[in-house]
C-alpha cells in the first residue's frame, strides 16, 4: 500500500526562502556571484531530489534529510549573504517593539536575579538545544516514514520562515549591541564559558528574529508529546529552561520569543494537516 502525497509544504516554504534570497543577491551582487549561486545550487539539488524521489523508501528519506544539510549550510552562509544584501540592522527596531510590549528590555530587568548557579543551569539548557536537535532528526529519520515526513514538514518550515526573518530583520541581540548597558556579568562554571564560546564562534550575527531556539525546541517538545511521550516528559524542564535562557543570557529580545512560539504553533499545525497543492508523489507505507 502507498500513501498519496503532494509537494511538501516545507519544500515550498524553504524553497521560497532560497528563491527570495537568491533573487536579492542577484540584484545586489550579480547572477554569477558565488554567494548568489550558492542558493541557486541548493534550489537545484532540492528540485533534483524531488524529481528523483520515485517510490522507494531510501529515496524518500534522502529527499527529506536533504533539508537538514541545506539548513546548516544556509545558516552558516547567511553570515556573508545578509551583509551582501545590505539590509538595515534591526536591533533598534526590536528594542522599540519590546518597549512597546513590556516597557523595558527583559534582559536588563533580569540582571536583578543574575547568579552563577542559575547562569550555569540555563547555559546548560541553552547548549542542550544542539544535541537534542541532532538526536531528534536521527530518531525520526530511522523511524516510521510517515512520521518522519510530518517531522520534516514542521521543522524545516520553521527554518525556512525563520531564515527569511533573519534576512529581512537581521539583528545581533542584546548581549552585543547593548553590552554597555549591562552592569552585572554572567559568571558561571565551565558550561557557561563553553556555551558563550560556542555562541561566539557559531553565530552568524543575524540570528535573532525570530528566536529559532524557542521555535524549534517547542516544536520538538510538542511533536514528541504526540509521537514520543517519554521524550516530552524528559525534555520539558530543560526546554522551559532554554526559553528562559534566551532572555537571561541576553541573546534575544522578547518579541523574538513571541515570533518563535507563533512560528512553532503554525508549523505544528502544518505538520499535522499538510495538504499542499503541487506535484503528486507516493510514499511507500513500509520500509
Image (cartoon, rainbow, N blue to C red):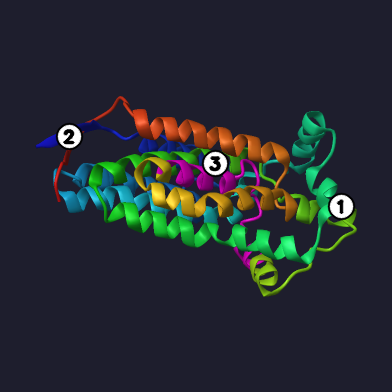
Residue at point 19%, 46% (across, down): 52
In three-dimensional space, the C-alpha distance between marks 2 and 1, rounded to whole angstroms, equals 55 Å
| Cα–Cα span, label 1 and label 3 | 31 Å
Horizontally, is 118 left or right of 259 in the view?
right
With respect to residue 72, does 156 lie above or below? above
Residue on which disc 2 sits:
3
Q: Residue at x 20, y 51 (%)?
A: 59
Label 1 crowd (10 A; few <14 / some 14-19 / many >=20): few
In the image, farthest residue toward the bottom: 190
The quadrant where residue 175 appears = bottom right
In the rendered structure, which segment of residues is drawn in magenta?
198-223
Quadrant of residue 261 within the rendered picture: top right
Question: What percent of the width, then of the height, locates residue 103?
Answer: 84, 33
Q: Which residue position holds label 1?
A: 112
Instruction: Describe residue 153's horizontal placement relative to residue 107 as left or right.
Output: left
Percent position of residue 94, x then y = 74, 38
Task: Judge depth for marks 1 and 3 and give the one in front.
Answer: 1
Q: CA distance from mark 3 to mark 2?
A: 30 Å
- Mark 3 is surrounded, within 10 Å at the Cα level, by few (under 14), some (14 to 19) or many (20 or more) other residues, namely many
Residue 18 % position (x, y): 45, 42
Quick one: SS at disc 2? strand
219 within the magenta span: yes
Q: Are marks 2 and 1 in contact (CB under 8 Å)?
A: no
First in residue order: circle 3 vs circle 2: 2
Q: Which of 119 and 230 lies nearest the eye of the viewer?
A: 230
Q: Is residue 38 above or below residue 8?
A: below
Marked residue nearer the N-terminal end (2 or 1): 2
Q: Which residue is mark 3?
A: 162
Counting every numbered tag in the picture gives 3
Amino acid at each position: 500500500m502507498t500513501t498519496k502525497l503532494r509537494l511538501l509544504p516545507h519544500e515550498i516554504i524553504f524553497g521560497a526562502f532560497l528563491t527570495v534570497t537568491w533573487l536579492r543577491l542577484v540584484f545586489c551582487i550579480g547572477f554569477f556571484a558565488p554567494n548568489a549561486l550558492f542558493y541557486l545550487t541548493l534550489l537545484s539539488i532540492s528540485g533534483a531530489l524531488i524529481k528523483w524521489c520515485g517510490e522507494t523508501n531510501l529515496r524518500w528519506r534522502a529527499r527529506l534529510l536533504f533539508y537538514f544539510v541545506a539548513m546548516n549550510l544556509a545558516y552558516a552562509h547567511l553570515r556573508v549573504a545578509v551583509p551582501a544584501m545590505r539590509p538595515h540592522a534591526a536591533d533598534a527596531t526590536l528594542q522599540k517593539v519590546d518597549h512597546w510590549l513590556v516597557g523595558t528590555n527583559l534582559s536588563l530587568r533580569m540582571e536583578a536575579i543574575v547568579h552563577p548557579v542559575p547562569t550555569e543551569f540555563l547555559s546548560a539548557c541553552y547548549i542542550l538545544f544542539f544535541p537534542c536537535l541532532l538526536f531528534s532528526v536521527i530518531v525520526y529519520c530511522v523511524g516510521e516514514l510517515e512520521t518522519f515526513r510530518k517531522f520534516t514538514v514542521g521543522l524545516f518550515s520553521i527554518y525556512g520562515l525563520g531564515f527569511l526573518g533573519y534576512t529581512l530583520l537581521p539583528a545581533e541581540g542584546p548581549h552585543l549591541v547593548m553590552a554597555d548597558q549591562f552592569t552585572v556579568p554572567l559568571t558561571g562554571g565551565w558550561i557557561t564559558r563553553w556555551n558563550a564560546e560556542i555562541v561566539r564562534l557559531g553565530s552568524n550575527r543575524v540570528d535573532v528574529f525570530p528566536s529559532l531556539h524557542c521555535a524549534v525546541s517547542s516544536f520538538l517538545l510538542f511533536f514528541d508529546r504526540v509521537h514520543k511521550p517519554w521524550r516530552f516528559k524528559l525534555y520539558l524542564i530543560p526546554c522551559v529552561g532554554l526559553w528562559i535562557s534566551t532572555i537571561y543570557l541576553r541573546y534575544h529580545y522578547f518579541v523574538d520569543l513571541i515570533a518563535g512560539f507563533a512560528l512553532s504553533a503554525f508549523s505544528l499545525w502544518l505538520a499535522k494537516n499538510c495538504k499542499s497543492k503541487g506535484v503528486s508523489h507516493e510514499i511507500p507505507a513500509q520500509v
